[in-house]
Amino acid sequence: MFASKGFRISALLATLIMAFSLVAVDTAQARRGGSFGSRGMFTQRSVPATPAAPRVTPPVQRTMTNGTQQNANRVGAPMARPSLFGGFGGALLGGLLFSGLFGMLFGFGFGGFGGMLALLVQVAIIGLIVAFFLRRRQRPAVAGGGPLPYQARNPSPNYGGGPAAASTPRSNASRRAGARDQIGITDADLAVFEKRLAELQDAYSREDYDALRRITTPEVMSYLAEELAENAAKGVRNEVYDVKLLAGDVAEAWRENGTDYATVAMRYESRDVMRDRTTGQVVSGDDRVTQTAEVWTFVRRPGTNWLVSAIQEA
């Protein structure tokens, strides 16, 4: 029975499905949402922890920034993550899998009960090898070449080549950031960041597209417009009000091709509810004050005001 043509084809298909499903486990974790926008050459880097956001924030998930070339040009760019089928592990896995498959196809190997037992043993070995390599790919970023925490980077270069701002005294938040602030964020800058936080939440709640365009980059505006359109299609409105900044810290600031970037961790309180557009009743969320920690990135070109260029969950 085990040597029949039908059994060989069925075993071949079952083995292929099993192997490819194991390999696909690592890629099935990708999901949409969480954060959006651009941080220039740091878009695909994690954001360092600060007192306002004590955990390292993962890289921006939804972005229009092409990170391939920027990764190559970035200081301390991580090495490419090795392929699951590369090196010795790939050779061993390929040998175990394809030698058995081709042997079965051409009428030798996996014959009788002993051959079937050998197939099961090889499948088990393949599973162990795949699990080993998946664990290696999920190691911390420094070992695996993924997004690096800030401590693994070299903070000393003046990113973009521009001189750090020295004409205006640094803010306390800038001094706490130390070498991570390459441009010297001032108290006036921090006041603008706090103002942008309140302005964006208010304009978003009122669905004021013109007000949102004035304070955001076109990329961020596109994501906000998409969210507002989805809410409208569902017959709901997201309202965020009573916004009050509790703490803010400069995570990093730099100059890139003559453009200033500042990534700021902000912890604030607000009321965040989803209401029915017709009745005004709350359909999700509690109409009470809650705290939120987020990382916002602002961009400023010469002679212009700070604009919101990225928002990330912290």
Image: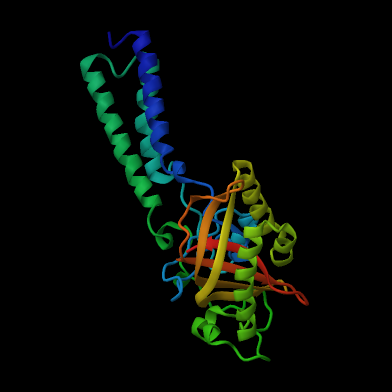
Q: Residue at x 46, y 43 (%)?
A: 27
Q: How many marks?
A: 0
Vertical order, 22 against 60 (above or below): above
Look at the image and tell me whether residue 6 can be seen.
yes
Taking the spot 61% from the left edge, 70% from the top edge, the residue there is: 198
Q: Position of residue 163 (x, y in %)?
A: 67, 83
Residue 96 falls in which quadrant of the image? top left
Q: Is residue 100 left or right of residue 187?
A: left
Position of residue 135 in the picture relative to residue 153 (left or right): left
Q: Quadrant of residue 125?
A: top left
Query: Please, is residue 308 above or below residue 181 in the view?
Result: above
Screen quadrant of the N terminus: top left
Q: Is residue 19 above or below residue 167?
A: above
The scheme the figure's colours follow is rainbow
**Relative side of 241 to 304, left or right:** left
Residue 219 rendering spot, x and y as whole percentages = 68, 57
Q: Residue at x 51, y 63 (%)?
A: 271
Residue found at the far front of this picture: 279
Task: Work out whether residue 206 or residue 15 is closer to the camera in this orientation and state it.
Answer: 206
> x, y (%) of residue 3?
30, 10
- Front residue of this view, candidates 211 and 8: 211
Q: Is residue 106 visible?
A: no
Extreme right residue here? Answer: 303
Percent position of residue 29, x then y: 44, 45
Q: Is residue 123 above or below residue 148?
A: above
